[in-house]
Each structure stands twice: as C-alpha cells, then as structure tokens.
Image (cartoon, helix red, strand yellow):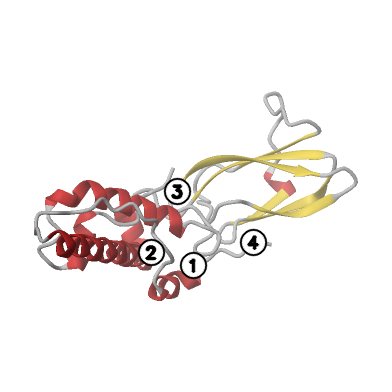
Amino acid sequence: MTLAATDIDRIKAAIGDAGASSDYDTELTKVALAVSSALEGPELLNRSILKAERTELYTIPQGKARRVLSLRQAPVDADEEFEVKCSSTPAFDTVTALPSTEYALVPTPAVLHMSPPVRGLAFVQVRYTAGLAADLDALAAAYPQVVEAATLWAVQWWQRRTKIDRKAESRSGSAGTTTTFTEALGAPPPVVRTLIASLRRVTL
C-alpha cells in the first residue's frame, strides 16, 4: 500500500489557475497516488513512504554466515515492537523470538547486527514498523521535501495533460473538446530528484 504524498488541494494550489476545477478531481487523486508510488522506486527514495508494521523473511544460504542484515524499509520506529526469529525452516509459529542481547538495531539505515552471526542454511523472520509517515499530515511535518516533490511531479503531469487537451481543442475548433490523458507519468522533473536526494536509501 502506498501513502499519497500529496493531495488535490496541494496540487491545485501549485497549479494556480482556473483549469484545476473539480471536474478533474478524480484524475488528480489518481495522479497523486501514481507519483507517490513512483517516488518509492529504487531510483528515487528506494523506500516505502507509508509507515506500517511489516513481517519480512530473510534466507541465509547453506554454508554462508550473516552478521549484518539490511531490512527492506527505513527508518525503523524503535518505539514499536521489534521481533527477530531464527529457524532452520521458513516456519516460525513455534519459534521463540531471539533475546535482544543477540542483535543490535540501527533504526535509521535499518541495519540489524546479529551476534553471533546467523549461519545457513537458516531463515530469519523480522517483524517491525518502518516507513516515513503514517499519514500525509505527519509526512508534511517530518519530510516536507517529499510532499513538495510529489506535488511538483503531479503539476508536471497536469501541464502535459492540459497541453494535449489544448491541441485537441485547436484541431476540433471546439473549446469543449477534451481528450483522455492516458500517458505514463514520464521521468520526474530534475527538481524532484534534487528535493529527495538526501532521503534516497542506500542499502548494504
């Protein structure tokens, strides 16, 4: 699930013209989700925007040992429950969680240091809460650059859509003629990359 990193009101305020009428609210809502999902991709944030509880499985191959595990989402909320289980099979129903003395968590990069190392073949299940924010207001307070990036990308989409509509009107000679905008978002504007560059997650 993706948390929309912007909303209709923010997009309309950034567009700043009468073209952003309620006629397009459904499309703007969809594009808000689309740009947010795209922002989470590996070339941009490389992390989930929505903060939520997650259960993840990590496999240690036969004959290998792992002292460090990079969790898939960050930052980890250290105030929420954090649980690690190890097993020789991917079944954990009867497995007891490891004591906290056998691992150390670094929440912001979401790195788990195991002590002693886990030797394969083994399976590690980690249950934790991570992500940037639980809702848009919290995201705007903690990471305003993400909200700005999402809004600017949505505005670029709107401008491309409007340009296509105007071309259609010019061809038809009717101001009431519109087209259905079905193009993909396209590449993010350079300013979007700049805004979120410091938040892009680099994993080990």
Q: Report the side of 48 relative to 59 (left or right).
A: left
Say which residue label 1 marks. Answer: 199
Label 2 CA crowd tier, 10 Å (few <14, some 14–19, many 20+): many
Say which residue label 2 marks. Answer: 146
- Please name which of the two marks, 4 or 3, marks the residue nearer to the observer: 4
First in sequence: mark 3 vs mark 2: 3
First in sequence: mark 2 vs mark 4: 2
The foreground one among 117 and 72 is 72
The foreground one among 3 and 127 is 3
- Disc 2 marks a residue whose amino acid type is Val
- Disc 1 marks a residue whose amino acid type is Leu
CB of mark 1 within 8 Å of CB of mark 2?
yes
Pinpoint residue 90: horizontal percent, then vertical percent: 73, 31
Q: Name the secondary structure under disc 3.
A: loop
- Disc 3 marks a residue whose amino acid type is Lys
Q: Report the side of 68 relative to 152 (left or right).
A: right
Q: Residue at x 52, y 66 (%)?
A: 200
Vertical placement of residue 186 versus 135, above or below: below
**Displayed quadrant of residue 164:** bottom left
The foreground one among 168 and 51 is 168
Q: What's the CA distance linking mark 1 and mark 4?
A: 12 Å
- Disc 4 marks a residue whose amino acid type is Thr
First in sequence: mark 4 vs mark 3: 3
Q: Name the secondary structure under disc 1.
A: helix
